[in-house]
Amino acid sequence: MAIADRDNNAKAASEGSKSDKRKQSLYFPESMLQEIKEEAARLDRSLSWVVQRAWKISRLEIKKLPSVNDVEDEDGDTE
């Protein structure tokens, strides 16, 4: 990581997540991406906005899902 990158990352972290505009690639199945695009067009919003709102709305439900370490294997033993 270059020094400028470290400085920018530290600055972004100190300013909070609302000002952090770093890019991240996400991969969706084609049909899901099409639905998100249609909703974005219907709402006259960006794809990013739709995905961010979906996360905010669903994150409490997602946190209820068991982690990989919480799932029992076929024998009923946990790893």
Image (cartoon, helix red, strand yellow):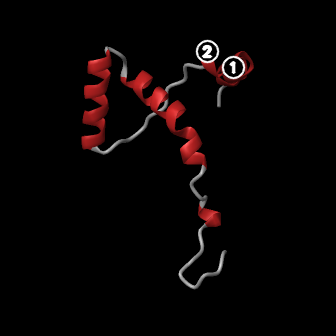
Left or right of 54, for residue 9 = right
Instruction: Please report the residue visible at 57 percent of the width from the left and 85 percent of the height from the top.
Output: 75
Q: Which residue is mark 2?
A: 19
Determine the image quadrant of residue 26: top left
| Residue drawn at 30 percent across, 40 percent down | 32
Tell me the distance, in whole angstroms, between the alpha carbons under discs 1 and 2. 6 Å
Relative to 78, residue 29 above or below: above
Under circle 1, the secondary element is loop
Please determine whether, in this image, residue 75 is positioned above or below residue 57.
Answer: below
Give the camera-side residue of 40 and 13.
Answer: 40
Q: Amino acid at mark 2?
A: Ser
Give the total number of marks visible in the rendering: 2
* Tag 1: amino acid: Gly
- Residue 48: give x, y in percent of width and height: 42, 24
Left or right of 75? Residue 43 is left
Residue at 47 percent across and 27 percent down: it is 53
Q: Locate residue 65 relative to residue 40 in the image: left or right.
A: right
Q: Residues within 10 Å of mark 1 (few under 14, many from 20)?
A: few
Q: Residue furthest bottom?
A: 75
Q: Residue at x 66, y 75 (%)?
A: 78
Write down the quadrant of residue 19 in the picture: top right
Q: Provide the residue designation for mark 1.
A: 16
Label 2 CA crowd tier, 10 Å (few <14, some 14–19, many 20+): few
> From the image, which quarter does the C terminus lie in?
bottom right
Is the residue under label 2 in contact with that under label 1 (CB below 8 Å)? yes
* Residue 11, picture quadrant: top right
Q: Position of residue 2 (x, y in %)?
A: 65, 26
